Amino acid sequence: MRLSRIAGEGVRALAAHKLRTFFMMVGTIVGIAALTVILAIGKGTQREVMKSVNAFGARLIKINAGGGKGYTKPQPGVVTLKLEDADAIRSAITGWDIVTCVAQKGAVPAKAGDRQCETAVFAVDSDWHEAMEWPAKEGEEIAPEDLATMAHVCVLGTRLAKTLFGEDNPVGSDIQIGNVRFRVKGVLIHHDASPGGEDENHRVVIPLTTGLRRLYNQNHLTYIRVRMKNADDVPATAEQIRRLLHERHHVTPPETDDFSIVTAKEVADAARGISGTLTALLAALAGLGLLVGGVVMMNILLISVTERTREIGLRRALGATRQAIFVQFLTESLSVTVIGAVFGGALGWGVSVLLPRFVKVITVISWEPFALAVVFALGVGLIFGVQPARRAARLHPVEALR
């Protein structure tokens, strides 16, 4: 009961000096708000990482033309990956379900009637639709006979179809891609944005043989996708493919690879690496804010001890112990930080909700930031409140009353 009464005295002292109390809270409010936003961004990033992994596919291995590590995009103009490499993978590697090839070109002019635009062209194998789990919603998909005959047929993404044909059904119509005329065979189902946030629906898909020999006039690929039967086999198979391509391309480590192999692990690691750097920077700023807030609070409390010297002396003269004075001032410190944590948490929650509307970032609100805010607030209050409380408790009553 006595402790609660002493703590109440500390809270009433804060209420009597509202402006001073507010300035002591500011650093805690800013620091806790920043910490709440950081944790919300971190949670959102974790969710996006899992979406990236799921979008890429846990059973997939992607071999890009051109060297590099991690989650890299295909490098245009690189000629290091050939159809023969895909055939070698099919022959030498076991456990795969689909091995499909893609030759990609960007910013290719496309025209239908008086409408025209630039689009990405993907020359693909007939099993590309199955490998990508991306069927046609209207018409037909690229078929084996289209590759065998080098047919001038194509399948449009939904946004490209709308750009070139509006609300009309494009199936059966002709379009011109580059200088070659194609018949629209189908329209792909709408696809979500890629892990990198790109709209994948503004594309056209054509047979691989037609693209290589009639449109691109090349014999190299942009990438090869390998879908395994079992996700557990992906790491070992990726290493087998690496060794196979080293042999085929005459690459001897530590020479730089002229290809890059990407799996779901690389996608997740790359995403975590980027988000980890950002989170660490923001966490450092939040920590700095809490540190500055703690120092400001300690200095104001020290000034308060000086201003209230006579009050402390009178309390001591009337029988208050050093412990009681210590508890009173420490209560003031803890009350400031805890109340600041409540306001900071509320501010951080509001910012986390509104932030995605103005910045391209994903936030997820959870209970952890609020629990962590209270822990940090108590820590700051204890660390920076002890010295003022000790100084107040050490004042001699006779000296204090002079």
Image: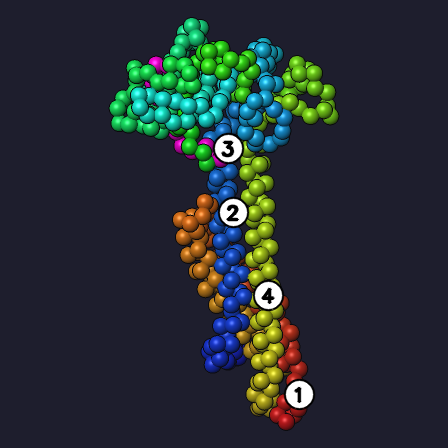
Residue where numbered disc 2 is placed? 42
Residue at left offset 44%, top offset 60% = 347
Q: Which mark is residue 396?
A: 1
Q: CA separation, marks 2 and 3?
A: 16 Å
Q: Which mark is residue 53?
A: 3
Residue at left offset 30%, top offset 16% = 173
Depth check, mark 2 against mark 1: the one in front is 2
273 inside magenta stretch: no
Look at the image and give the residue range highlighted in magenta: 182-196
Observer able to see residue 310? yes
In x, y percent, where is residue 21? 50, 74
SS at mark 1?
A: loop
Q: Nearer the viewer, residue 324 or 32?
A: 32
Against 35, residue 109 (above or below) is above
In x, y percent, where is residue 192? 40, 32
Q: CA separation, marks 2 and 1?
A: 51 Å
Of pointers 2 and 3, the one earlier in the residue sequence = 2
Against 261, residue 23 (above or below) is below
Q: At label 2, which amino acid type do we have?
A: Gly
Q: CA separation, marks 4 and 2?
A: 24 Å
Q: Which mark is residue 292?
A: 4
Tag 4: Cα neighbours inside 10 Å, few (<14), some, or many (≥20)?
some
Confirm or deny contact between disc 4 and disc 2 (CB under 8 A). no
Q: CA separation, marks 3 and 4?
A: 39 Å
SS at mark 4?
A: helix
Q: At label 4, which amino acid type do we have?
A: Val
In x, y percent, where is residue 198? 45, 34
Depth check, mark 3 against mark 4: the one in front is 4
